[in-house]
Amino acid sequence: MFIKNNMYLMLAITFISLSTSTAIFTETVSAEQTSTEISESTTLSKDSTTGNTMETASSSSSTKETVISSADETNQINNVEQTSPVPVTDDEEELRKQFEADYRSSVMSFEEYKSFIETLKKLTPTQSDLPAARAFSAGTQRDQIVAEAKKHLGKPYTQKHPDRLGPNKFDCSGLTRYVFLQVTGKNIGDWTVPQEKSGTKVSISKATISQLQPGDLLFWGNTGATYHVALYIGNGQYIHAPNYDTNVEVSQIWWSEFPPSFALKMNLSDPVAQGEPINDGSYVTITKKGYDIYNSFDWSIKTTSDKILNNTYQAKVKYNHSNGITYFSLYDSNGTWQGYVNSKAVEKGAGKQGAWMKNDDFVTVTKNGGTIWGNIDDFSSVKGSTTSLYQKTYHAQGRYNHFSGQV
């Protein structure tokens, strides 16, 4: 029995040894296959959208992007992106595992990451919630950039490298990189931090969004530690690849809940459709209803001429737009910008008094000691006093709604 048992034991050990060896061999083959797959995925691939051959290898694009601080940092980012974090989850332990595997953990704390995920889940709107954005003709580079981004709406999010660089899947920076590469031929950087260097940084708020044009970039996070980027398309909207379990989509800017930290004005070669600003300086009075007052030349509306009818503003500059219309850029007496208005909605005045408007009222002078002006542009000429006219009635044939707000 001892010998028999010993033989059984030896046979069992041999079987275990063979099984272990087989398992190791299988794992080795799997690793080789993975290596082959990665090698194949980093070779030249065909762009399914344009039919052009483009390079998507991380090693190629990262070595060209000189703004990344070191080769080690580049490798660290790409190594993190090789992982496939679990999908977005409500379980905090699983979320922490996802955070540790997410490349954004290099620029965010877990609490910041958790807040970011929760905010995206809460705020991401559906397409039907959004106002209509401008329809682009795909003529200028900016038009082409927006049109290219729209081609990829609905494509899934991934951080797997190099899949995240498109054209079938994206993360946020992979999407912006791909769009600019297709339209301009320029690699703006493989992830958010080098992309911060691809344009002119500007502060951004709801009040200043009009300075941006479609094709500019929006960033979230501190300079050098940004964690999200999106492509501005005008009308307060952007296209982005938000997060796991989501697709490339259009979103409005959530100014209160999720405002961009800053923006980049991208240096694109196309002339702007409105042309260059021309100094004007005249004073104009809004005399016609039914005209929109624009926030920007992407035609987002600030107000209407009906709401500011008969007010006088200074037209500091004007634009002779390519559509054949002249637009005035209006400022009030406090220097606050009011928007762009079609010149057909206004009448020019001889000075700060604005335009003469027919009145046809009969008025009685009821106060002593008031000044009668000979000049109401700069109030440099006094004609007399209301004392001599006190309680007399006159025909007020016209009136001026002065730049100062007085009539």
Image (tube, grey):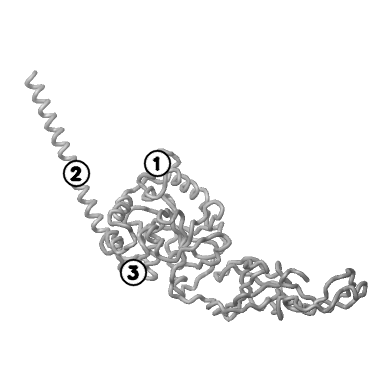
Say if residue 247 shows up in the picture: no
Q: Residue tagged by mark 3?
A: 51
Q: Tell me which label, 3 or 1, sits earlier in the chain.
A: 3
Mark 2 falls on what kind of element?
helix
How crowded is the residue under tag 2: few (<14 C-alpha within 10 Å), some, or many (20+)?
A: few
Q: Amino acid at mark 1?
A: Arg
Q: Are marks 3 and 1 in contact (CB under 8 Å)?
A: no
Q: Picture quarter containing residue 178?
A: bottom left
How crowded is the residue under tag 1: few (<14 C-alpha within 10 Å), some, or many (20+)?
A: some
Q: Tell me which label, 1 or 2, sits earlier in the chain.
A: 2
Tell me residue 391's x, y (percent). Answer: 93, 72
- In the rendered image, which quarter contains the C terminus? bottom right
Distance, label 3 to label 2, CA atoms, is 38 Å
Say if residue 205 shows up in the picture: yes
Q: Amino acid at mark 3?
A: Gly
Label ID, residue 195: none
Please state if 29 lies on the left or on the right of 254 as rendered: left
What residue is at 57 percent from the left and 60 percent from the top? 206
What residue is at 13 percent from the left and 36 percent from the top? 18
Q: Residue tagged by mark 2?
A: 26
What residue is at 88 percent from the left and 78 percent from the top? 395
Please state if 155 lies on the left or on the right of 161 as rendered: right
